[in-house]
Image (cartoon, grey):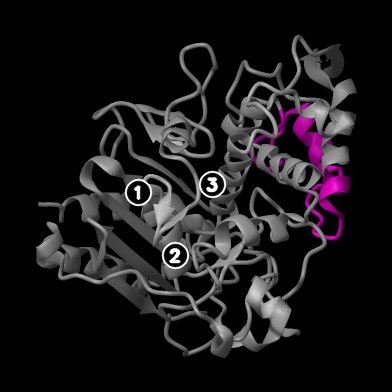
Amino acid sequence: MTAQTVSNFTAIPPRSALQTPPLPIGKPQSIGLSPQRLQRMSDAFKREIDKGTIPGVTVLVARRGQIGWFEALGRQSPASAAPMAKDSLFRIFSMTKPIVSVGIMMLIEDGHFLLSDPIAKFIPEFADQKVGVETQGKLELVPLRRPITIQDLLRHSSGITYDHTGNSLVQQLYQQSRLRSRKISNAEHAALVASLPLICQPGTEFNYSRSTDILGRVLEVVSGQTLSAFLTARILAPLGMAETAFYAVAENAGRLAEAFPTDPWSGEKVQLFNMLEQPIMESGGGGLVSTTMDYARFCQMLLNGGVLDGHRIIGRKTLELMASDHLGSEIRRDSPLLAPGHGFGLGFAVRTQPGLAPFPGSVGQFFWSGVAGTFFWIDPAEQLFAVLMSQGPGQRDYFRSLLRDTVYAAVE
């Protein structure tokens, strides 16, 4: 590995080469958080670890620009006695999506394209795409009523889907394809998605999907860079996120957080990608590896309205647009990923009602998570954010609500 590779963060370098600056630390009571109640949060996660629900977790809570609580609990991996560490490395999966979505909006701010632009303008294969309509167990292909736009990709109203969120005839075609391969390029992946039918007409339904992977390819086409090079130059390096990349070098083998090989709740085998293996496909929808502090720096930038340590990443009004609901009443949102009282913006879920959801929060709160057990939220009204890192796919929904309940109980 060259010195240039280290400085450009194209891979997570050895620990000795890292220069991720920490965020300021304050006493919980000085930033309006109860230390006794945050300890109860910590105790709740310790109970889960003791029960064998998960090997370990990290939890970081910050308010008013300072970290009020940061703990690493349990073990880093079930195969080792090594304790979980504050700088352990995690597969963040779909927490990659907000970073890539910010990248897209930066190019919009630069004047390269509009939210309303069709994606076929950048990836011509999408010009001939069809919608798959199921009729008596058969798939009928019908023309698009309108093109997929950049906005559709950001808010998951494109008609693109995921192969693991259902078993429709379109999703069965996804399952039979090479879409899950990490050995195809972003260009090949986008062309493959374009060759498959959509699950619905663009702009009609929220379907969580590979849309952000396609945005990653748009970033490459427009910038003329690889996705990793663009993200590093425009977001990761300015934010000091030296420990975030699409893979880590071999010297980091002792820092990898791992899940149980068999999920303790579902009994299903857990298979996660190798963080030390460089993928050909740099998945904009779920490929990044990161640390708790790195992602906390991204969150603090978002909470600050797009700026951190003097580096303006994105405009305040652009971020305001991203953190607003873009589904409205016209786009069907029957998805288990969106709790009652929530919508979806341009890369984040957004809370639109103070009630309805079975967990606390504030109107205007925005957040997302990763399938392997990572989670974050930004609460501008309370000047608060939290980051949970774990590698426990089966427990992810439960832990998200557990974290919300216990952190909001500590807000004074």
Look at the numbered disc 3 and give the secondary structure of its residue: helix
Magenta stretch containing residue 165, yes or no?
A: yes
Q: Nearer the viewer, mark 2 or mark 1?
A: 1
Instruction: State the residue position of label 2.
Output: 389
Badge 3 local density, few (<14 within 10 Å), some, or many (20+)? many
Quadrant in the rendering for residue 158? top right
Task: Check disc 2 and report its element: helix, strand or loop.
Answer: strand
Query: Which residue is found at the position 82% from the left and 41% from the top?
Result: 190
79 versus 195 height, above or below: below
Residue 162: x %, y % from top left: 69, 39
The spot of residue 317 in percent (x, y) is 42, 33
Q: CA distance from mark 2 to mark 1?
A: 19 Å
Q: Main secondary structure of the magenta part?
A: loop
Q: Position of residue 118 (x, y in %)?
A: 75, 23
Instruction: Say which label, 1 or 3, has the lower sequence index.
Output: 3
* 305 versus 95 height, above or below: above
Q: Is 223 colored magenta in this rendering?
A: no
The numbered mark, 2 or 3, whose residue comes first in the sequence reads: 3
Amino acid residing under circle 3: Pro
Q: Which span of residues is magenta-colored? A: 160-189
Which residue carries the number 1 mark? 303
Q: Is residue 144 visible?
A: yes
Which residue lies under the disc numbered 3?
98
- The residue located at (60%, 55%) in the rendering is 234
Q: In the rendered view, does 132 fall on the left or right side of 361?
A: right
Residue 253 location, quadrant: bottom right
